[in-house]
Amino acid sequence: MEANHESNLTNLQAPLLAEYLVTFHWEPRLFSVEYEVIGENGIDLSREDQLLYEWISSMFTMLENVVNVKADNHLFLSIQLEEKEVRFFFEISGIIEDTDRLSAWIQTQPNYFVIESSSVSPEECVIQQVFTKGNNNKADGAS
């Protein structure tokens, strides 16, 4: 099953994103990551690769800054592919020490990542964000 998701991830034509997720555990981390890629086959995210990589890596950095260093923290990431958009479902379990900081970060996402729902508590965080392909113009407020 894990190999199937890894294969689906590499088929997205987003090598930076794929490498980051596949190799995430190669260094000591404050949380573990499990991911799945489901939905449309043949989606090409090559044009959005850098953007998605930077966004995911910034989220993971934020998580490392807000979770308890001694807790068993786990992130489950579901990437759901549709024709014109990619949905990201994040479920973080463990101990989140700075829920205010994480909540503020979630609310300040670039315009091309629409937050459909989010819930942050000291024990878990659930975020659903939608990225619309081709709507990642740097003029929209992205950095």
Image: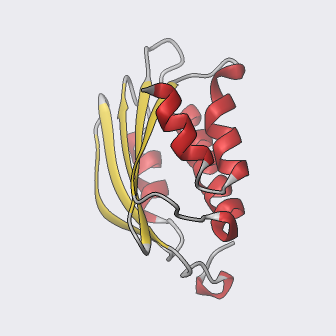
Quadrant in the picture for residue 77: top left
Figure check: 110 above or below 73: below
From the top left corner, tell me how far across and down residue 76 is, in percent: 40, 34
Quadrant in the picture for residue 140: bottom right
Figure check: 69 above or below 3: above
Q: Nearer the viewer, residue 107 or 1?
A: 1
Q: Which residue is most to the front?
A: 42
Identify the residue shown where x is 42% and y is 70%: 85
Figure check: 134 above or below 67: below
- Position of 55 with respect to 2 (left or right) is right
Identify the residue shown where x is 57% and y is 32%: 64
Quadrant in the picture for residue 78: top left
Q: How many numbered marks does the figure carry?
A: 0
From the top left corner, tell me how far across and down residue 10 is, in percent: 62, 45
Identify the residue shown where x is 50% and y is 77%: 111
Q: Considering the image in quadrants, where does the C terminus appear?
A: bottom right
- Position of 143 with respect to 118 (left or right) is right
Q: Which residue is most to the bottom?
A: 139
From the top left corner, tell me how far across and down residue 8 is, in percent: 52, 44
How is the rendered protein coloured?
secondary structure
Q: Nearer the viewer, residue 78 or 90?
A: 78
Q: Considering the image in quadrants, where does the N terminus appear?
A: top left
Q: Which of 48 and 44 is in front in this view?
A: 44
Figure check: 126 above or below 32: below
From the top left corner, tell me how far across and down residue 33 is, in percent: 50, 29
Q: Nearer the viewer, residue 72 or 75?
A: 75
Identify the residue shown where x is 45% and y is 47%: 102
